[in-house]
Amino acid sequence: MIHRVLAADLPRHVGEHVEIAGWVHRRRPLKSVTFLVIRDRSGLAQVVADPAEFPRLPEETVVRLRGRVTANAQAPGGAELTEPAVVPQPEPLRPPPFDLYRPTVPASLPTILDNAPVALRHPLLKARFTIAAASVAGFRESLATQGFTEVHTPKIVATATESGANVFEIGFFGRPAYLAQSPQFFKQALVGVFERVYEVGPVFRAEPHDTARHLAQYTSLDAELGFITDHRDVIAVLRQVLAGMVEGVAVRAADAVGLLGVELPRVPEEIPEITFADAQELLARHTDEDPRGEPDLAPAHERWLSGWARRVHGSEFLFVTGYPMAKRPFYTHPDPAEPAYSRSFDLLFRGLELVTGGQRLHHYPDYVAALEARGESPADYHDYLAAFAHGMPPHGGFALGLERWTARLTGDDNVRRTTLFPRDLHRLTP
């Protein structure tokens, strides 16, 4: 029986009769011979055929071919398929929106997004998502080795997660419900069950942003851990996770990294830190703006601070700690020494805020006080607060956006290039 082999494995079967399957990536008919390049999930394979005996197969035809594997140093991997016979498959009804065999992508971002199911077959576009998948694998592996349990929490919730108005309201059997802004409430509750948890899943933000860094739905990599001293324990775990993600990409997506020319970052043993207040002082002294008094960093400030971290510390990563409580969610733990500031952080990577995290409140009375101070009723958070009424350890966590991470790695200027079927202000299809 002839078995299918992958394109990348052809060199191991020289002299054998095998079957390959995939798509016609490129067809090059010459006078006396026709070369076909077949693309499958592992890469490209060359097929050599007699044009008089071989049917004309348009690019992107799905094919199964049987033939003899012959050594050829000029072929991909050093081997090619000769004497091919076609196992009939249906031909495509229409051509792709642009030539997928070209070494670059000759199409605009809207054209790519409008035709994503076919456009993403292009090796350069597909490679971004190979890197994203490897990143997630590294995330999971790193946390699993640190004693975390993977969980899967509801994406339909009864209240807004972070007291925000920017939520998607949906109907739920005759009553209002919302798409979850994050798994925050659930992962905190599950610290009381598993102590250390993580989740990979979609989150939804009905924020009317039309920028290159915002989406209405994105993939969040979340982690939460108990029995911490303060936010620095969370930072230590995150540093390990980042190293694991970079290693995951290097090991699992080496071909994609090479194809895109990605320069993987070095994760320092100790990522440099700067307090929010000190960051504002630096910006006031060295830029044309004085951000002191502002509760957050503007995108331009993030870019400047990232450049400063590279120059001064030789790091592409920078932790900014101690954000004002006024800018953080109600569950954030304040700094006991300076209650107006928080035990929280953002991680900047290559000019962009990538991760937000910190220590959470864990005493029930502190939650009641925090909600009342913001003019909210604790009764609206009864189910969430119940976990704390039964006792919770000091805990904290973080959330990392997969699409932003991938875009920072690949150098893409728009997160839509690293998002499968993005959802934003203007796009609900395909």
Image (cartoon, rainbow, N blue to C red):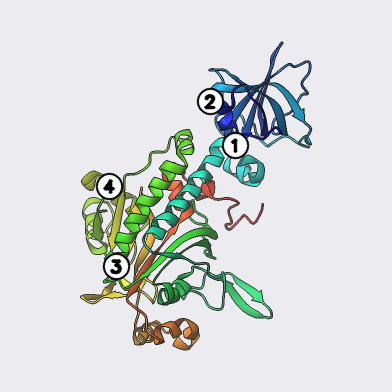
Against 275, residue 430 (above or below) is: above
**Residue contact at pointers 2 and 4, CB within 8 angstroms:** no
Rendered residue at 55%/26% (across/down): 11
In this view, the residue in front, 81 or 285, is: 81
In this view, the residue in front, 284 or 173, is: 173
What's the CA distance linking mark 4 and mark 1? Answer: 33 Å
What's the CA distance linking mark 1 and mark 3? Answer: 42 Å
- Mark 3 element type: helix
Residue under pointer 1: 122
What's the CA distance linking mark 2 and mark 3? Answer: 49 Å
Residue under pointer 2: 77
2 or 3: mark nearer the eye: 2
Hey, what amino acid is under mark 1?
A: His
Rendered residue at 40%/87% (across/down): 389
Residue 18: x and y in percent read 66, 29
What's the CA distance linking mark 2 and mark 4? Answer: 37 Å
**Residue contact at pointers 2 and 3, CB within 8 angstroms:** no
Residue 281: x and y in percent read 22, 59
- Mark 2 element type: helix
What's the CA distance linking mark 2 and mark 1? Answer: 20 Å
Q: Earlier in the sequence, mark 4 or mark 3?
A: 3
Hey, what amino acid is under mark 3?
A: His
Residue 263: x and y in percent read 38, 38
Callout 1: few (<14), some (14-19), or many (20+) C-alpha neighbours within 10 Å?
some
The tag on residue 268 is none
Hey, what amino acid is under mark 4?
A: Ser
Residue 86: x and y in percent read 76, 28
- Mark 1 element type: loop
